[in-house]
Amino acid sequence: MPTILTTRVRVLLAGLRALLVFTVLCGLAYPFVMTGIARGLFPDQADGSRVNHRGREVGSTLIGQSFDLVDAHGNARRFDADGREVLAGADGKGYTYLQGGGTLTAEQAAGVTGAPDPTWFQPRPSAGGYDALASGASNYGPENPTLIQAIKDRRARVAAFNGVAPDRVPVDALAASGSGLDPHISKTYALLQVDRVAHARGLDPAVVRSLVERKTQAPIIEVLGSERVNVLDLNLALAQVTERRG
């Protein structure tokens, strides 16, 4: 007749065996099988829908990104609140002005940002800087004064940047998406940028507008959402046109 201790040991060993079996099945076998199926049937999606251009990875069709001004080495250029270009310190923390070498105060450094490149179509705003690890919205309510001021500032900047009246700026150019990673903009916002992009690249606006039309995606199953354009996809098509022209 088994003792209480013997029974407990048998139950413990049975539990350990079950743990090992399910660890192998659910923690190893299942992920490997599903990953293999996904990579076999949907290689692009399983690999993160990454996009390569001229042998270099330039982004993902699933995650938005900024298209800011860069220097000759591909490093992002930075500007203070007054539009003066600044240079990051050797430790990557402090900023100095390129001309004169004056060091920015902590308050000035907090306002340093990139500047949108006029030769590219621009995405919608992102509360997390398009960082997949910081996905999310600002969580400001519609009456929050910080959000209201941000919307006003964005409207003024977008209107001035594209040379249009403020009342023509669409909502997706003003409000960040819930994830902060939306790779799409509305067709309306894309068309708003056509003249600015064409002028910056020396292209016929009709050519640039045709790219927008060609890259416009219909609403999901024709009823969900509105017409939209993947910004990275559109900009890659724009780069190809410019390269052929050059």
Image: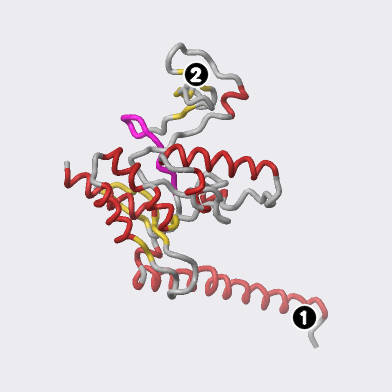
Q: Position of residue 146 (x, y in %)?
A: 67, 41
Residue 180's disc number: none
Q: Which three-letter amino acid code belongs to the residue tagged 2?
A: Thr
Q: Which three-letter amino acid code belongs to the residue tagged 1?
A: Thr
User: Badge 2: few (under 14), some or many (20 or more) residues near its Cα, within 10 Å?
Assistant: some
Residue at 60 percent across and 41 percent down: it is 150
Residue position for label 2: 96
Q: Position of residue 9 (x, y in %)?
A: 74, 75
Q: Quadrant of residue 199?
A: top left
Badge nearest the viewer, 2 or 1: 2
Judged from the image, the secondary structure of the residue bearing numbered disc 2 is strand
Residue position for label 1: 7
Majority SS type along the magenta span: loop
Q: Residue furthest right?
A: 4
Q: How many numbered discs?
A: 2
As drawn, 124 above or below 41: above
Q: Position of residue 15 (x, y in %)?
A: 68, 75
Q: Quadrant of the C terminus?
A: top left
- Which residues make up the magenta segment? 65-74
Q: Nearer the viewer, residue 75 or 220?
A: 220
| Sequence-first tag of 2 and 1 | 1
Q: Position of residue 62 (x, y in %)?
A: 43, 58
Q: Nearer the viewer, residue 131 or 112?
A: 112
68 in magenta: yes
As drawn, 154 above or below 76: below
Judged from the image, the secondary structure of the residue bearing numbered disc 1 is helix
